[in-house]
Image (spheres, rainbow, N blue to C red):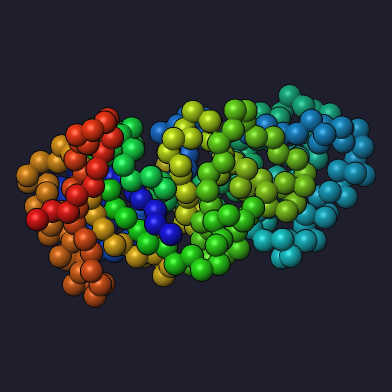
Amino acid sequence: MKLYQYLNFDEKDGKYFRLETVRRNKLWQSNPTKFNDPQELKYTLDKNLRLMSGKPQKIYDFINEILSSDQQYGIGHSVLDLNLLKDISTVYGGILEQESELTERISWAFLPNLCAIACFSEERSHPLMWAHYGKGHSGFCVTYEINDSSDTPDRYFLEHIWGGYLRHVNYVSRSQSINHWDLLFGAAFEKVLCTKSIDWAYEKEVRYIVPNLVKDEKEMGTEIDLPAGFRISEITAGVRISPENLQHLKHAVEDLKTLTKHDVKLTKAVISEDDFGIEIRDIE
């Protein structure tokens, strides 16, 4: 399996920090609250949960079920602490005007505080991806070969692999609704982190989600070692890359070869002569 990551030559502290991350065989994991889509992390609370209003015994049974099954069902709900669960009880006890504040607290409790995300695409030659994430075709695209013998990306929710979770993004026309079963079995984790508007479907996005990385909502993200199941096999220069930045890519490729002891290919994106597409060619 191959995944692709479009990057640019933006500078930070006098360095091309995206290229520097790749050159050292690292992976940048972003805080999902800083993504470019303002609709990210959007969800609503299922109306069926509201039917619990006025039925405190059902509410507390639900809360106790979550707490007692924490170890059994994993990370999806385990960050919902006692105080937050009491707030859930209050909201579903009839004070529904607090729902907006509650959903915001849930988001912070089990999303950025728990996860950081690296975003990939299954598509290497999409003009919009090059224009957007490759900064007007002046950036580069990294090819990752994924050791995927268990075919995990097609499962509903992934087992813990390589320290994180690899998951296809689901594209929908309406925001997701979370119910108590989602909270209990961890599906809320996926519904919020792995769902985007259908308008973004051309990205064919796959996300690598790692728990417990972003501790402060102001952080942009953090750098991790490239997971054991990942290998950088190729770097592709954009159509409009400058001669200077092409040299930077060449040096990065050589450094990667030395560091990882395996081959890394350098290629170039070019405009197709037959249509509006993009072709990938070897650099001589």
Residue 259 appears anywhere in the view: yes
Residue at 25% x, 72% y: name it: 262
Query: Split into 4 quadrants, where in the image is the C terminus?
Result: bottom left
Q: Is residue 95 left or right of residue 32?
A: right
Residue 83 appears anywhere in the view: no
- Viewer-proximal residue, 44 or 245? 245
Residue 171 drawn at (x, y percent): 55, 36
Q: Which residue lies most toward the bottom here?
A: 261
Q: Which residue lies most toward the front here?
A: 274
Query: Split into 4 quadrants, where in the image is the N terminus?
Result: bottom left
Residue at 26% x, 38% y: name it: 278
Number of numbered markers: 0
Q: Is residue 115 left or right of residue 6?
A: right
Residue 47 drawn at (x, y percent): 79, 30
Q: Using the image, determine if residue 206 lies above or below residue 233.
A: above
Residue at 87% x, 36% y: name it: 52
Residue 93 drawn at (x, y percent): 85, 34
Q: Using the image, determine if residue 53 lies above or below residue 3.
A: above
Q: Which residue lies most toward the left here?
A: 243
